[in-house]
Amino acid sequence: MNLIKIILCVALISLLSCKRESTIEIGSVISLTGPAGIYGKDAQKGIELALAEINAKNRNRQFSVSFEDDNTQPQRAVSALSKILMNKNIQVVIAPVGSSSFLSMCPVAEKNRIVLFATGSSSPKITNAGDYIFRNWVSDDFEGKAMANYLINSNKRSVAIFYVNNDYGKGLEDVFSKEVENKGGNITYNDNFSQDNSDFKTQLVKIKSSGADAIYLVGYSKELSKVLNQAKTLNIRIPFYSTVTFENQDVLDLSGVNAENVIYTTTEINKTKEDTLFLNFQKRFKTAFNTEPGVFALHAYDAMNIVALAITKVGYNADKIKNYLYTIQGYIGVSGLTSFDQNGDVIKPISFKIVRNGKFVFLDNQ
Amino acid sequence: MLFQLLLIVLYKASLFLLLSLSIAIIYYPTKFFNIAHAAIITLGGFITLFFYRQLGCNFYLSILIATAACSVTGMVIDLLFYRNLRFRKASSLSLLLLSLGLYVIIINIISLIWGDDPHSINTTAPGVGIELNGGYISMIQLYTILTSSFIFLGILILMKFSILGKKIKAISSNRELSDIFGINSNSVIIICYLFGSAIAGLTGILSGLDTDISPHMGFSLFLYGAVCMIISGVSTFSWLLCGVFIVSIAQTIGAYYIGSMWMDAILYIVLILFLVIKPLGFSGQRLKKVEI
């Protein structure tokens, strides 16, 4: 009798342990609040959609992502990362944050030997930030150079640059000014503003009198719309050019007609052509969240899928995942082709978009 | 271009004048920096947003309601919190800390309801400003300058010719003595809070109409007003004019010739210089204290 009970118990326990799912926990430090909050919230939706799809495909292997907000502040990003790393199970952290926050987290990730994956940080400094550092967002080297060349080719040789004072702005300013001067242009005005500044009148007056025929504006949507509005009041007719952070509904809402004809760079590829992967994703995203995916959601979605792919292939170990990521070439995703180079960086083509009639459209569709 | 800078200086000076007036009216009788004042500035903008954009009320009515609401909020804060501490002769430091706590609570409530992102009270984006001799100024900025001058003159007349003005001066000089002489210091202080908070709310609205509102706009505005007030000295309100012009000229010149990063730094350098060289402020006069 006792033997039968023991056998039954053992059978029950083994059955239960078979049914128990192994949940792979991934961490994420993300900007949900602060100036970069709108981009972070966009990225979060991309990750959540990818997560839902991955978990639906394989019931035996479930992934979970725990999000920690950095409030667009580097010191908060570091403490968020430290909090995540208290859970020793986590081997990968996906980080849709700005460059300043990301760079501050890199040493912590390197020291703890976990993979840190950026989905929207563009500073050139990230290229050499570490062995465990990856990103599927292109370095500013490309975005800054592309805009500089565009301006020179459009015969706008006297350029003013007005940028936000953090690693994102400074990185772009560095690349952009060098390229403009290399190609025979001239930077007539070079100044920055702090992340929470709201009064740009005096600087705009200075830009107006500097003789610039183009203004390169680098910042987050909060400041961009204020600059545009204040420039309009001061009757500044010089055209504005901006970067991918310009593409946000907030900018259109707050600046209205003052945002018309602003040209900006993006890593999004013109998808009006037939691209079933992207169109399907767009449909699913819209069904899930009732809004269009932004370019940050695209990259975060791809990042989540790439990480899940790596884990499925080599297991949940940071060193193995890291080595596998370096081998990824030509991964087809909704943000385009992803191939990691020896620094964990990617190369993606830069497109130009413009605001026409209150909408963001590709420049070559004109 | 110089005239354009002059217009900017004029606008900034008007904004600072309103701010420092609203802080000074409360500071003179109570003698502590009410940091919750910054929250009231922000509140003005957000309540206007609520009534105008979200409930669809008339624009001027929304401004009126918001100003009144801020006024009442200031009074309520005094009745509920500060009055008790004043009665118990708490130090200025305790009141300061209390006001800081209140500021954090109110701002977080605002953040909870409306979120951290900036909002616009205007329904349309601003167009080209009015042209004046080569410089441009928007209607809002013009209104701010007019409102500021109006209120400033009003307060000066009030202080000089009305009995209320004399009562405020008496209480600023020595509160215990005023009480003994039969001036009800508590009710005069409440009136000061009503006025000061109303002006603060109005300033928040004017600033918000010029450069959109967000939960943290109040604090930097409050600091500007406080610095102007310290630089001006604490004798009469008319000296505030000097302080605000010094600050706005220094800021604009600094931003223009050195760089925008120096706007705030210059403000504090001027403050430090004044505290070292002329600690009693521009007027150089001490409020006459009657000692028994």
Image (cartoon, rainbow, N blue to C red):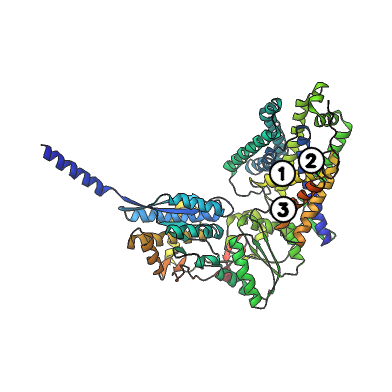
The image shows residue B192 at horizontal and vertical percentages of: 77, 32
> Looking at the image, is mark 3 or mark 1 nearer the viewer?
3
Whole-angstrom CA distance, mark 3 to mark 1, is: 13 Å
Q: Foreground residue, A325 or B55?
A: A325
Front in this rendered view, residue A348 or A366: A348
| Labelled disc at residue B21 | 2
Disc 3 crowd, CA 10 A, few/some/many (<14, 14-19, 20+): some
Q: CA distance from mark 2 to mark 3?
A: 20 Å
Q: In this orientation, which residue lies closer to the viewer: A191 or A334?
A: A191
Q: Secondary structure at mark 3?
A: helix
Q: Amino acid at mark 3?
A: Asp
Q: Is residue B209 above or below residue A308?
A: above
Q: Which mark is residue B264?
A: 3
Residue A91 lies, in percent from the top left, at 40, 56
**Picture quadrant of residue B30:** top right
Q: Which residue is mark 1?
A: B222
Q: Is residue B185 visible?
A: yes
Examine the rendered structure and indicate whether residue A15 appears above or below residue B99: below
Q: Residues within 10 Å of mark 1 (few under 14, many from 20)?
A: many
* Vertical relation: A264 (above or below) A197: below
In the depicted structure, whether residue A330 falls above or below residue A311: below
